[in-house]
Image: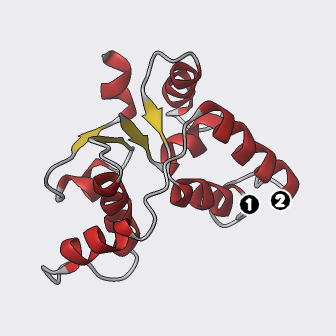
Amino acid sequence: MILFDTNVLVYAINADAPQHRTCRDLVEGVQARQVDGVLVPQVLLEFYAIVTDPRRVARPLDPTNAWTQVEALRTIFPVRDAGSKALDHLRDLLKDGKTTGGDVFDAFLVAQMRACNISAICTCNIRDFARFGGIMVHSPEDLARR
């Protein structure tokens, strides 16, 4: 089971992104049940936040269209909810004192992965997740080659 990071979903709908074709093909692979992809609620919320923010995307979606995209993703991907168990895993990840600021959101994704027994993540930000042990980190290009 592979968690898809927010950036993969954003690039999948942004035809102007250089990663668009690869990311779109992966999402279509999940839809066709050829790729065992999953999401967590945090990814869907981050997706909505990014695609509606004119500071983050050149052509932001209006809230209604953005939520339509979220609903479409929910029909393609199973959504796992780790609940409060993820906070216990996050506490363990934060014990080293090295995670601060916005990095807590990546750590929380890893905590949710652990709570839901998700072994891998597909992301365009390999370095953000490489520091966490016990998970496999794949770029969209790497995953598409499989």
**Location of residue 20 with respect to 101 vertically, above or below:** above
> Residue 52: x and y, percent?
74, 60
> Residue 11: x and y, percent?
57, 40
Label for residue 10?
A: none
Residue 88 left/right relative to 55? left
Q: Is residue 74 visible?
A: yes
- Residue that badge 1 annotates: 52
Give amino acid for label 2: Pro
> Residue 134: x and y, percent?
15, 50
Nearest the camera: 4 or 81? 81
Residue 53 left/right relative to 47? right
> Residue 108: x and y, percent?
37, 66
- The residue shown at (56%, 42%) is 9
Give the structural element (helix, strand or loop) at label 1: loop
**Location of residue 90 with respect to 22 vertically, above or below:** below
Residue 18 left/right relative to 51? left
- Residue that badge 2 annotates: 63
Marks 1 and 2 in Cβ contact (< 8 Å): yes
Q: Badge 1, how many Cα within 10 Å: few under 14, some, many 20+? A: some
Q: Is residue 14 visible?
A: no
- The residue shown at (20%, 52%) is 130
Quick one: label 1 or label 2, which is nearer the N terminus? 1
